Each structure stands twice: as structure tokens, then as C-alpha cells.
Image (tube, rainbow, N blue to C red):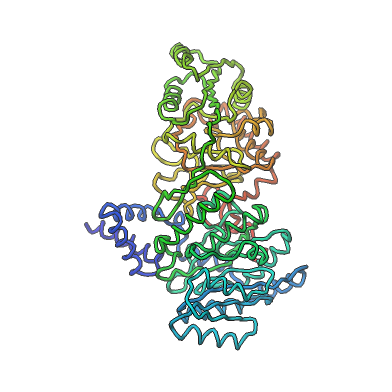
């Protein structure tokens, strides 16, 4: 009993840190009881005890504080160096920092204003709209600072119109070339606008910029850093990765029509969706530095998305309207309550295009039977063929099974007795495929979700999409494949590997569809035309890394690869082929590693789906802090 109480109290303490105090933590569980009864509260306790819902075990206060001291401190020496760098800028545009306020906490409001005044980059204006606050302190503070610094401009609204209208009022007095969005109780580090302008100079054609962020606890300590990936269109349809710090070209915001009333709580998300539609994905640039400190005040979504359920409803509506505007046939579904995560479900074209499932195999009939029967019995996709590539099976039971399944109208068995070469086997089978889409499938795969192929084809048929990978689980329900990270261990490795089912991963990325550099060919769907366009699998890579090389070439051709957690299958990995570390395979594996390092040397240093502030050390879990980072605070 004592141990159970310690576990519960420890969990409440962790949640108190995230919610900005014990009152917030107790409120969190009260909501769980109201929504799901005792079972719902128990489920949240279990998730928190195992780390779910948090940033994949965010660094402790001591670890993060030490990292900040070493790598993210902007002192006098850094300020002097920044001034030297600024003297070289070809452009030093005016930045309008836009802030809506309403009954702001005086301490937080002054901290926000002072953080802007402390910027090493001085060409800014602070545009504040007070939304008819009923408390006298905000107006007093705003008038005092406006008199103190002529760069601070304030408009006092006579009628409360909520955050969208207040933001538009602040925007109406902005005269800068760019607009940075800041909340009334949050804080910018002193180098935030310097970093933005540096990236404006690095990327003069870009129209939108966003940075990494962390949070401020109730006592003002920095916590829970979110080191984001580079612009990721599919991930953005699941979370607002752009906000904090989000910077827009002012002309772009005005062209998009500013903030829209009725989207309060997700008004910046709605704005960003509309701006991306106009600017295009290639005009969005990520700044891999912590340029925003988001305060976890009670009632703020910084602590928990469930604090403002209306914000989620607004986000879903913004997504639905975005999808309609771009002509995408899709629905938006909420798949998790805490954290709030949505799934954009793309419709399969009608009639459904034919998919050719290609399964190389050699004996191992029990695995193959499990694979094919799970496809036939659990797949609801209406139009597919199965091509089994028999690479020299000799066992009578296997040959008998081939004869049995060959009687099915949508199953073919083709014999290929050449030496095992995964790439060559698939390439020759693709030449026989009659589908418009291909699904490369290992013989040790077992279908879990009946709509797996609907999900993958729906994603693959979207304009600009290339290879699509699935969530593959080991039989013990730990994650085998959550996408591929380039550079890990020298070449590539799996994301969130061995994570237990039910956890969310780094800021939810284990349960969110996203663009990645590569996915595994153990279950990969792609248009056949793209497969041919890039030359298929590279037959120089007989076993390892042929899928990584393939995906990188698909990316080079201008397509975006996608990993989806909404297509789930079991992977009984290497059950028939064995490990690459077996003595008879090691030499071949090492040669394939060297081939990849030679061919893709320029790609292995930086994966746009990761962050240079996070480790690539294979001895450490992914998404832990890099020591040192592969970028500097003044880069």
C-alpha cells in the first residue's frame, strides 16, 4: 500500500510540474474522473507512471539546467559577438512583435515587455492591443512602457472581442516587414530576434520562420524543451509545430486576411494554414534554436492541451477548412484525448486503384501463411493482388502451400532461383505487377489494423507524396519501426525503437503521421510510376539499406516520404533470414554500410526530420540532448 501511494504521489508531483502547480494536477485528475470514471483516472496514472504524455522523458531540471549553462546561455560575450555579426547583415528589417492582452498578470506582462526591450537586435516595434481589460493594472503598465520607449505602440480596445480580434487590432498598428507573434505572459530570450533576422538573411526568399521552444514553470524555471524538426507538412496537420516562435512576412499575413474570429484558441494555427497555402511549403524555414519560453500558467495549453478543449475544436475546424480549400478529400478525427491528437484520414480514390503486394520468400511456410492469411482475412481494401516471389523454396510443405494459394484469383506465385538479393527480387516482381501502386511486404509481416492499406494508399495518392511506411510492432507490442532516422549509428536507425505500445514518444511523434527521410521496405507503399522514375531498389545493396537508399532517392526526386502510425502490423523481424551480425553475413553488411556512407555522405550529417540539438549517439536514446549540439546559439 505504501509503495502504491508513493507511485501515485510521484505521478501527481510530475503532473504538478507540467500543470503549473498542485491545483492544476488535481484538476487534471478531476477531469479524468468526470470523463472516464475511475478507469479513466487509472489509465492516466498508468500513462504518467510510464512516461506517456510527456516529452519522451524530458530532461530533469538538473540535466537541462546544466545543458543551458553550457550551450544555451546568451551572456555579454555572446551579445558582443552577435553585434559583430549583425554588422554584416545585408538586411536589417523592422520586426513587429504583435501581442494581444487581456487582464494580464502584471508580473508576467512586465516580464514579456522587458524581454522584448532586452533584444540584442534593436530594430523592432512592440504592437500591443489591450482587449478591454477590466482590471486597471494592464493599462497602467502599458501606458508607462509606451511613454518610456517609443518603439512600444498600444491600442486600447473599447469592446472585448477575444483573441482573434485583439490580435488583428495589434496587427493593424504594425509597420514592420515581418510580424512575430508573442503571448502576453511569455518571454523571448535576448537573441530571439537576432536569430530570426540572421535566418532572414540566410533565406531571403522565405516568408515564414519558426523556432524551437521550451516552457517556464510556475516558479520561472525553464523545462520541457521541444527541439523541432525542419518543416514537416504532414506533422503540421497533426500539431501546430509552427507556433513559438512564429514569424511571418507581414504582406503574407495581410494577403491571408489576418486572424479569423471563431477560431479562438487555434487562431494562430488557422492563420498559419492559410499562409502556407499562399506561400508554399518551400517558403517555411526552421530555426533550430530555443527562441521562445512558453509560460505554464494555470489554464494555459502549455501545460496540457485539455485545458482549452475549445482550442482543439477550433483546430479541427481550421484543418477541415484547409483541406477543403486545397481540394483534399479527407476527414479529421480526434484519436487521443490527452494529449489532444488528430488524424487526417485521406480518402481512397474511387474506384480504388489496384495495389500489387510483393512478398519475397524462401520456405518459412508458417510465417508466410500467417502473413498471407492475415492480409486476406483482415484487409478491407477492395482491390489488390499478391505476388509471392519464391526465391528457391525446397520444402514440400512450402510448395504445397504455393499450389494452394495459387488457386486464388488475386494471388500469383512466381519462381526466382537467383542468389538472394532483396532489391533484385523486388525489381523483377515489379516488372510483372499490374497495380498502379506497389506494396513491398516482408513475409514475416502480420496485419493488425484492417484499414492499413486504405490508410497507406490514401496517403500515397496525395500530391507530392513518395514512399509511405507503416507502424510495425514486435510480437511483444514494442515498436520495431516508427520511421527511419538518417545518421543514427553512422547510417540510419529506427525511431522510437522498442517503445511500448500506449506511449506517445517525443512530443507525440510516435503516434503522429509525419514526413521522414526514409521508411522501411518491410511494409512500404508507393506509386509504381515513382518506383520506376527513381530506378527501383538498388541491386548493389542486396540486403541492408536498400530501402533507405531508395527513399533518399525518392526525396531527391522531389517527393516527400511519409510514416503513418495509423497502419499497424506485426513484424516478426528477420525470422527467416537471421541477423546481419551472423559471421557469414557480417562482411556483406559492412560493405553495404561503407557504400551508404560514400553515396550519402552529405545526407548522413543532418536529417531534416530531427534536430541538431538532439543526440545521434547510438548508445543513448533518440531525442535526448546532444552533448555538444551540432549547432551553436549564434549559428
Q: Residue furthest left?
A: 1
Image spot of residue 304 (x, y percent): 42, 62
The image shows residue 521, relative to residue 293, as above or below, that is above
Image spot of residue 26 (x, y percent): 31, 65
Image spot of residue 519 (x, y percent): 56, 39
Would residue 177 appear left or right of 234 to someone viewing this image? right
Image spot of residue 214 (x, y percent): 51, 64
Q: What residue is at 40 percent from the left and 68 percent from the top?
A: 299
Instruction: Report if residue 537 is visible in the image.
Output: no
Q: What residue is at 57 percent from the left and 26 percent from the top?
A: 584
Q: Nearer the viewer, residue 622 or 97?
A: 97
Q: Nearer the viewer, residue 51 or 350?
A: 350
The image shows residue 422, relative to residue 306, as above or below, that is above
Q: What residue is at 48 percent from the left and 32 percent from the top?
A: 573
Instruction: Report if residue 361 is visible in the image.
Output: yes
Quarter of the rendering occupied by the N terminus: bottom left
Quarter of the rendering occupied by the C terminus: bottom right
Q: Nearer the viewer, residue 527 or 477?
A: 527
Q: Residue 374, located in which quarter of the rendered image?
A: top left
Amino acid at each position: 500500500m505504501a509503495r502504491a501511494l508513493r507511485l501515485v504521489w510521484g505521478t501527481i508531483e510530475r503532473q504538478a510540474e507540467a500543470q503549473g502547480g498542485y491545483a492544476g494536477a488535481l484538476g487534471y485528475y478531476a477531469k479524468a474522473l468526470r470523463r472516464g470514471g475511475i478507469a479513466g483516472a487509472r489509465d492516466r496514472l498508468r500513462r504518467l507512471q510510464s512516461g506517456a504524455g510527456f516529452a519522451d522523458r524530458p530532461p530533469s531540471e538538473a540535466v537541462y539546467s546544466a545543458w543551458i549553462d553550457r550551450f544555451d546561455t546568451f551572456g555579454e560575450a555572446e551579445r558582443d559577438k552577435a553585434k559583430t555579426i549583425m554588422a554584416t547583415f545585408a538586411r536589417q528589417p523592422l520586426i513587429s512583435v504583435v501581442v494581444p492582452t487581456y487582464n494580464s498578470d502584471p508580473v508576467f506582462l512586465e516580464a514579456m515587455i522587458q524581454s522584448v526591450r532586452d533584444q540584442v537586435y534593436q530594430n523592432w516595434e512592440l504592437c500591443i492591443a489591450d482587449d478591454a481589460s477590466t482590471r486597471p493594472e494592464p493599462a497602467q503598465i502599458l501606458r508607462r512602457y509606451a511613454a518610456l520607449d517609443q518603439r512600444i505602440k498600444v491600442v486600447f480596445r473599447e469592446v472585448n472581442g477575444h483573441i482573434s480580434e485583439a490580435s488583428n487590432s495589434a496587427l493593424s498598428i504594425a509597420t514592420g516587414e515581418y510580424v512575430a507573434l508573442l503571448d502576453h505572459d511569455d518571454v523571448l530570450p535576448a537573441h530571439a530576434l537576432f536569430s530570426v533576422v540572421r535566418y532572414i538573411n540566410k533565406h531571403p526568399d522565405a516568408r515564414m520562420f519558426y523556432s524551437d521552444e521550451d516552457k517556464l514553470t510556475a516558479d520561472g524555471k525553464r523545462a520541457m524543451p521541444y527541439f523541432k524538426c525542419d518543416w514537416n507538412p504532414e506533422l503540421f496537420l497533426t500539431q501546430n509545430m509552427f507556433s513559438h516562435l512564429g514569424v511571418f512576412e507581414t504582406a503574407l499575413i495581410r494577403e491571408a486576411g489576418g486572424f479569423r474570429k471563431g477560431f479562438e484558441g487555434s487562431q494562430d494555427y488557422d492563420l498559419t494554414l492559410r499562409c502556407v497555402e499562399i506561400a508554399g511549403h518551400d517558403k517555411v524555414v526552421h530555426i533550430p534554436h530555443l527562441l521562445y519560453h512558453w509560460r505554464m500558467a494555470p489554464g494555459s495549453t502549455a501545460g496540457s492541451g485539455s485545458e482549452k478543449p475549445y482550442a482543439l475544436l477550433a483546430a479541427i475546424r481550421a484543418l477541415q477548412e484547409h483541406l477543403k480549400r486545397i481540394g483534399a478529400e479527407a476527414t479529421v478525427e480526434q484519436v487521443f484525448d490527452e494529449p489532444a491528437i488528430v488524424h487526417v484520414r485521406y480518402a481512397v480514390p474511387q474506384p480504388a486503384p489496384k495495389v500489387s503486394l510483393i512478398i519475397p520468400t524462401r520456405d518459412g511456410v508458417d510465417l508466410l501463411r500467417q502473413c498471407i492469411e492475415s492480409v486476406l482475412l483482415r484487409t478491407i481494401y477492395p482491390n489488390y493482388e499478391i505476388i509471392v516471389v519464391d526465391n528457391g523454396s525446397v520444402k514440400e510443405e512450402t510448395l504445397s502451400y504455393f499450389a494452394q494459394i495459387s488457386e486464388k484469383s488475386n494471388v500469383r506465385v512466381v519462381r526466382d532461383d537467383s542468389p538472394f538479393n532483396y532489391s533484385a527480387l523486388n525489381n523483377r516482381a515489379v516488372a510483372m505487377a499490374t497495380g498502379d501502386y506497389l506494396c513491398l511486404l516482408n513475409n514475416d509481416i502480420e496485419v493488425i489494423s484492417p484499414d492499413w492499406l486504405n490508410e497507406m494508399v490514401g496517403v500515397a495518392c496525395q500530391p507530392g507524396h513518395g514512399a509511405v511506411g507503416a507502424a510495425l510492432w514486435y510480437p511483444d507490442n514494442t515498436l520495431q519501426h516508427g520511421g527511419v532516422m538518417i545518421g543514427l549509428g553512422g547510417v540510419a536507425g529506427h525511431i522510437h525503437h522498442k517503445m511500448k505500445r500506449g506511449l506517445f514518444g517525443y512530443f507525440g511523434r510516435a503516434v503522429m503521421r509525419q514526413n521522414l527521410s526514409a521508411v522501411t521496405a518491410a511494409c512500404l507503399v508507393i506509386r509504381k510510376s515513382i518506383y520506376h522514375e527513381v530506378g527501383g531498389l538498388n541491386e548493389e545493396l542486396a540486403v541492408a539499406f536498400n530501402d533507405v537508399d531508395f527513399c533518399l532517392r525518392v526525396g531527391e526526386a522531389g517527393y516527400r516520404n511519409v510514416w503513418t502510425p495509423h497502419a499497424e502490423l506485426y513484424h516478426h523481424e528477420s525470422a527467416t533470414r537471421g541477423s546481419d551480425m551472423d559471421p557469414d553475413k557480417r562482411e556483406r553488411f559492412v560493405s553495404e554500410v561503407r557504400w551508404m556512407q560514400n553515396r550519402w555522405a552529405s545526407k548522413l550529417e543532418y536529417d531534416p526530420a530531427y534536430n541538431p540539438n538532439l543526440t545521434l549517439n547510438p548508445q543513448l536514446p533518440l531525442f535526448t540532448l546532444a552533448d555538444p549540439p551540432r549547432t551553436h546559439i549564434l549559428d
